Image: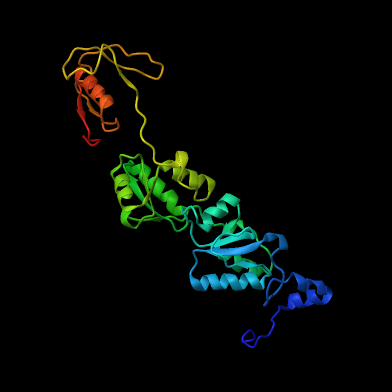
Amino acid sequence: ALERRRCRVIGYPFAERLLRDASALAKVHALPLFDFIFRPSAGAVCCSGLQQMVRQRCATLTRWMGARFAESETLGPEVGLLVTGRVSLHPDSKYQAALQRRIPIVRPSCLEAMWEAKSEVNLEPHTLPALCGLGICFGGLLQAGEMEALQAQAVAAGAMSEPLDRAEVVIVKDVFAPRYLEAQRIGILAAPPLWLERCLELRCCVPIAGELEVQNPQSLQLKLFGGPSPAPGASHALALVDASGKAEPESSMVLSDCVICLLYLPPGELRDVAKAMAWTLGAHTTLSPFD
């Protein structure tokens, strides 16, 4: 009501401060103001991903406590605190920008606690959990026990376990997982268990990049000794060569009870060589990991 009447509203603590030092008025960013609770060096407060009523409450508290409230759509250089209700993997999000600049990321409860205490508080209890609000789908060719353990840790860190069609990220072991292919088709991010472990370790939602991306499985190099790739059943000597270049001795039917999946090898000469080797050693081959 006083603001609608264009009254300039200040709090009793700031009125006392102003009587002691009239120059304090020059430090005011905007009115109304209760008192300088934020340190001047703390920077502006910015919000992201909040409902309108919560955002308005945060803006009001920020100004009442003497800090500048940043209204911009991006995280400006003046921002020293990000208030949000969830993490984001979008590369242009305020959350990712705050991570890069090492700006504290807290929940709205931080401002409420400061207003209640009328002083700055420890940010640790109000720090945004590592996966807060992120929808994650589990089970991309992971063993049951491993999936349950990852899911429990992620949910404890604020994630929401979702089916694939409602998830933002699907956890898969490698690029051959059926859910990886489906996630690619419908435009959902995919990440390996290593990414989830790294987020939990660092206590923030890091980008899915570099070694944290879903990887292609590594294969041993196959070489053919005695000429080009033979037809199935031929008697050319075949050997499996490790990284040192040392060849294993030729065998006969030592793999007669084995079924070897060649799906991880690219189509072409390498897969043909592997197939010929397997048949020469008595094994069966398949392109399905479930056989």
Image quarter for residue 243?
top left
Image quarter for residue 162?
bottom left
172 to the left or right of 78: left
Residue at horizontal 37 percent and vertical 19 percent from the top: 242
Furthest residue to the bottom? 5
Give the quadrant of the C terminus.
top left
Q: Is residue 139 visible?
A: yes
120 to the left or right of 131: right
Q: Position of residue 122 (x, y in %)?
A: 64, 58
As drawn, 278 above or below 73 = above
Residue at horizontal 34 percent and vertical 58 percent from the top: 166
Q: Position of residue 11 (x, y in %)?
A: 71, 78
As drawn, 210 above or below 205 = above
As drawn, 250 above or below 187 = above
18 to the left or right of 101: right
The front one of 105 and 119 is 105
Number of numbered discs: 0
Residue at horizontal 62 percent and vertical 71 percent from the top: 61
Colour scheme shown: rainbow
104 to the left or right of 257: right
Residue at horizontal 48 percent and vertical 52 percent from the top: 91
Image quarter for residue 230?
top left
Q: Position of residue 10 (x, y in %)?
A: 71, 79
Furthest residue to the right? 20
Furthest residue to the left? 233
Give the quadrant of the N terminus.
bottom right
Q: Is residue 107 visible?
A: no
Q: Position of residue 87 (x, y in %)?
A: 49, 56
The front one of 212 and 152 is 212
As drawn, 185 above or below 235 = below
